[in-house]
Image (tube, rainbow, N blue to C red):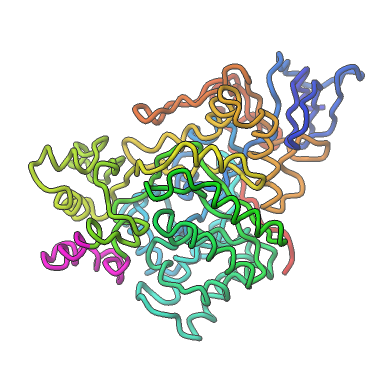
Amino acid sequence: MELVIRDARVIDGTGGASYRADVGLTGGRITAIRREGAPALSGVRTLDAHGLALAPGFIDMHAHSDLALLRDLDHSAKAAQGVTLEVLGQDGMSYAPVDDATLAEVRTAITGWNGGAPGDTTVDFDWRTVGEYLDRLDRGIAVNAAYLVPQGTVRMYAVGWEDRPATDAELTRMKRLVAEGLEQGAVGMSSGLTYTPGMYANDSELAELCRVVAAYDGYYCPHHRSYGAGALAAYQEMVELTREAGCALHLAHATMNFGVNKGRAPELLALLDDALDAGADITLDTYPYTPGCTTLVAVLPSWASEGGPEAVLARLRDEETAERIRHHLEEIGSDGCHGVPVEWDTIEISGVIDPALTDHVGRTVRQSADARGEAPWETARCLLIEDRLGSTILQHVGHEENVRAIMRHRVHTGGSDGILQGLKPHPRAYGTFPHYLGRYARDLGILSLEETVAHLTSRPAARLRLPDRGLVREGYRGDLVLFDPGTVAAGSTFEEPRTLPVGIPYVLIDGRFVIEEGARTDVLAGRAVRRTASA
């Protein structure tokens, strides 16, 4: 053996009882497992686990590292958590497939998520297709990555930013773009149905695209149309749409937020159980925190975002139109804010693009407005204009009882939804996986440690149709994490969100140490993980 991990507490990802064993690796794969009492393995290198738990590497089912993996080769934000695979292309917006014009537009639209605004030269955008982007990842990245074809980007490419049904020719083009992305290795398709322009697609259009996804044995991952006033109806819409299309469904950051949904997670879970019992193929992911995170521009009503970023800025500068936007936000409840009237004291500024605006960071919009002596909408409006829509926010609108109920569900998986931009990002970007293991498994007992590991490993691997990941099993890839069950914890907090976790001393990808003795190595063992099933 090239490496023998001796006397580990193996939590193998099945959810079953853990056991003590030696685990041997050669050529990047697990080649032998010898349980306690069997003859010991020998290897070129031996690592004494000293009672550490050995688990499959964690799979982040909802990541926003599309540019971070290329810009920050260290990427300890995820590697130090034990994450060995991230799923990119989320919420319907990413950087492939594109042409030159679409790339410039999408870079502007999601600067708050990923950086990379036009003019930023830290990443060389030397791809246009999904396959070319995956090839770019194959040059070497910190952790493995899979990709979802982003429906909003596809619509931007084929239709533009107009709020109208696609023509037959445009729909044909979108279906071809989705098919090409899947053929080139994408594992499915995502949508952001509270984000423009993806939200302009009706259910008929989405179902047609989902039929393409189903033909390639992929899955549909929607950020659906409401997590607030219309949340249950929005979940039902996605269940019915994918049932009609015959497509597997994975619900992104499945939460029930805002005051209207306090304590209503059991209603969502009953809806999902009924569909599962009827034969639906459904999974979901969550992060173990109550606040959400997005961009400030995302809360605007969809009509205000039609036409793209420059059109949004023009509307914000026009006094009469800006007043209409305020009315929708504060009195009606915009679709961008999930049908709920905005509460400015729940919206905390987490990041800005323009350094001159950093005084806003860490304050709620209302706190910034009070400091400036003006109404909250005027503060938000000025920030949107001056930061060219790049500001990110935390929305403190979640409920702990809902978080706990959903994470117990039989199809639950873990996803960080981690936005790595901003001076004060959401701590989930650096802490999701140790937070599950430490707080929710060990400290609160919401799930057993074995169940928690299964939620973070084998369940997502099954959704991704990966035949050799997600379990500690002979023949499987050597994507592994060693952690101390007694001390593992998220270091990140809302005050210090970039603090790395504790209790995770070793992480391996393809049998190579990415984290060793608690420190990041210079190994870039990550590659693109492509869909392998034939159409």
Q: Residue furthest left?
A: 373
Q: Position of residue 59 (x, y in %)?
A: 61, 42
Answer whether residue 520 is magenta in the image.
no
Q: Is residue 74 visible?
A: no
**Residue drawn at (57%, 73%) of the image:** 207
Q: Main secondary structure of the magenta part?
A: helix
Q: Position of residue 157 (x, y in %)?
A: 44, 72
**Residue drawn at (46%, 42%) of the image:** 418
Q: Is residue 373 left or right of residue 9?
A: left
Quadrant into which the C terminus falls: bottom right
Q: Quadrant of residue 277?
A: bottom right
Number of dots carrying numbers = 0
Q: Position of residue 404 (x, y in %)?
A: 54, 37
| Residue 41 sits above or below residue 412 on the image | above
Q: Is residue 166 visible?
A: yes
Q: Is residue 372 left or right of residue 211?
A: left
Q: Which residues are magenta?
A: 302-327
Quadrant into which the N terminus falls: top right
Answer whether residue 315 is magenta in the image.
yes
Q: Quadrant of residue 215?
A: bottom right
Q: Quadrant of residue 454?
A: top right
**Residue drawn at (40%, 28%) of the image:** 493
Q: Position of residue 474 (x, y in %)?
A: 83, 36
Give the camera-side residue of 331 and 143: 331
